[in-house]
Image (spheres, helix red, strand yellow):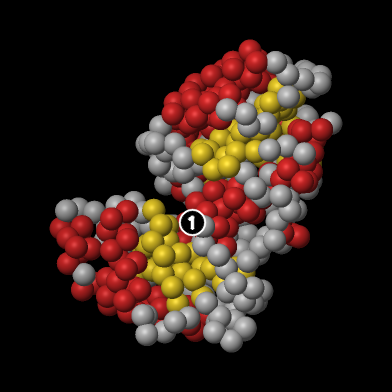
Amino acid sequence: MKYALVIPDGAADEPQESLDGQTPLQAAVTPHMDAVVKSGIVGRSDNVPESMPSGSDVGTMSLFGYDPLKYHTGRAPLEAAAQGIELGSNDWAIRCNLVTIIDQIMTSFTAGQIPSDLGAHLVDLMRQLVEQDPRWDFRAGVSYRNLLLYRSPDGTAPFDAETMTYPPHDLTDGSIVDFLPAGPGSDLLRSLMDLSKDAFLKDEWNQRRAGEGEYPATQVWLWGQGSRPALVPFRERYGVAGAVITAVDLLRGIGRLIGWDVIEVEGATGYLDTDYAAKGRAAIETLKGGADFVVVHVEATDEASHEGDCHAKLEALYEIDDKIVAPLHEYLRSQGDYRLLISPDHPTFLRTKTHSHGYVPFAITGQGITPDDNTTYDEVAAEYGETFKEGHLLMDRFLHQ
């Protein structure tokens, strides 16, 4: 048996006035996702517990079959794992975004999709500013996505579960005044954020972007902190060896922590310009290479919602359908027994430009799946199918029932 999961990140949404009351999934041209439903089932799952902030760290962990209420410690430790960074038992990882804040408004949570070389330069600048304090360790990532590590010098840490930080992508076009770090250790985080402001303002390379009509990074934004997680290996838990294809460190990290292979794909960007076809080909080659289970994650639909771009979201859904779902499903049918699952991790609303709580639609087809009467893959059809109030239970349904 071969298994595949396609994740159109943040694809679930609300009805749109611009789409005559349809959701993007209803309005998008997705004949191959619809074909999965016609030969299988459609339903819905709630992947993010109401008590937790909505995001891919929580939603994806749930979608992979791990109860986030039990296993989730924070977003940044998962991304640290993606980079092969080891955390001590009292160390913490903190997400470090490069952002553009103008007059206290989160103008761009990506600093205008800042180039990775400039991003690495600014992270190195922060590293130099704190080099006399061995507790802090800045690590460059990709574009605006970077990390800060707190290395405990004495077996203690200033942070705990009461430390509050806020994802910058949830503050797009809004005031940051009421969303600065709060609680234990927040004074340390705020001081580092303040330290970055003057340094970035004086940096010539960074400020050159403003003259070129691009957003410069105005500061770092620290959030998503957490200590080292302890996840049971996926093969031990479900009896299947897996691999993940993604351009996002967060999912790479979860994959590594549960013992999956992480497949790198040239042209995978984690943005709207990602190479969808390359991801589809890589998924097929991964299964041909002996993997039992491959996960293909696409961030583009989520990014479109964060930018409030309905057209881009429709286009991304079409590309996922045509260049990933279609060839992957064709291969799976040709090779023998299989199961295919399609599901977002969480909703991301175009209206609010942020992640949301709530149900997302899933579709499953393949060996042992008795088709229902639904014919389309969308939120409305999903209301008539199976419902999982605890999304982490869906994986067992997909693999074993």
Q: Residue drawn at (66%, 63%), measured in percent from left and top?
A: 229
* Left or right of 148, for residue 205: left
Residue 86: x and y in percent read: 55, 65
136 and 103: which is toward the camera: 136
| Residue 203 position in % (x across, y down) | 21, 70
- Give the residue at x 34% y 73%: 126
Q: Nearer the viewer, residue 208 or 399?
A: 399
Crowding at label 1, few (<14), some or many (≥20) Cα neighbours within 10 Å? some
The quadrant in which residue 41 appears is: top right
Residue 365 higher or lower than 77, as above or below: above
Query: Is residue 293 depicted above or below 117 in this figure?
Result: above
- The residue that disc 1 covers is 83
Depth order, front residue of 101/82: 82
- Residue at horizontal 35 percent and vertical 73 percent from the top: 127
Count of picture labels: 1
Q: Name the spot of residue 323 as percent of width and height, x first.
A: 48, 23
Figure check: 395 above or below 290: below
Q: Quadrant of the C terminus?
A: top right
Residue 94 visible? The answer is yes
Q: Quadrant of residue 309?
A: top left
Question: What percent of the width, then of the height, locates residue 56?
Answer: 58, 50
